[in-house]
Image (cartoon, rainbow, N blue to C red):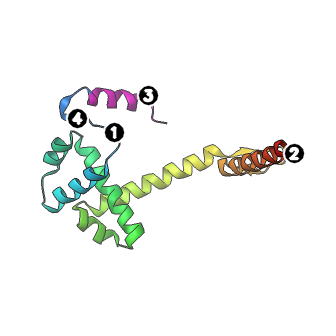
Amino acid sequence: MPSSAYKDILKAQREVEATSRAGLKWEQDEDEKLMTMVKDKIDLAEIAKSFKRTEGSIRTRLILSSVRKMENDNLSLQEAANLFFISEKDITEYLEKKALREERIANKTKITKKTGQNVTNSDIYELLQKLQKNMETLLAK
């Protein structure tokens, strides 16, 4: 869940016409338009203005697209960076921060049972699914 400060920033950005779509979900046609504009080498500021978003959100969208291409199409870091006209450093920094976030989340979601074993949210979800099946079985009788 986004922090209160982040929500306040988004609210302020949305009140300004130039960034009124900041933080909103991207539509499929917007992604396609973004890729066309990037291939046409349109300046990041112009792209942001066109989408009524911040330059940072455009850069982040390009980084996310590059990461997806690396994962789905086996592109190298350099190939992905070149495809989206962003730096390899931007992608690397994003991946490092993502790994740190995931590690923090994993550590935060672990709780210790009386037996001393760690339980993750995934473990709890599986147990709840089993419980639901058991309840459905009992109610069916």
Disc nearer the start of the sequence (2/4): 4
Q: Which mark is residue 4?
A: 3
x and y, in percent, of residue 57 in the image: 29, 45
Q: Which mark is residue 141?
A: 2
In 3D space, how far apart are the residues under numbered discs 2 and 4 (Cα atoms)? 57 Å
Disc nearer the start of the sequence (1/4): 4
x and y, in percent, of residue 104 in the image: 55, 47
x and y, in percent, of residue 70 in the image: 38, 68
The residue under label 4 is which amino acid type? Thr
Q: Which residues are magenta?
A: 1-14
Which residue sits at x=17%, y=62%? Answer: 39
The residue under label 1 is which amino acid type? Leu
Q: Is residue 10 magenta?
A: yes
Describe the element under mark 1 as helix, strand or loop: loop
In 3D space, how far apart are the residues under numbered discs 3 and 1 (Cα atoms)? 16 Å
Disc nearer the start of the sequence (2/3): 3
**Rendered view: 114 above or below 99:** above
Which residue sits at x=22%, y=44%? Answer: 55
Which residue sits at x=29%, y=37%? Answer: 22
In 3D space, how far apart are the residues under numbered discs 2 and 3 (Cα atoms)? 48 Å
- Nearer to the camera, 134 or 72: 134
Can you identify the residue that label 4 sits on? Answer: 19
Describe the element under mark 3 as helix, strand or loop: helix
The residue under label 2 is which amino acid type? Lys
Task: Point out the frontmost of discs 2 and 1.
Answer: 2
Task: Point out the frontmost of discs 4 and 3.
Answer: 4
Whether tag 1 and tag 4 are in contact, CB under 8 A, the answer is no
x and y, in percent, of residue 124 in the image: 71, 47
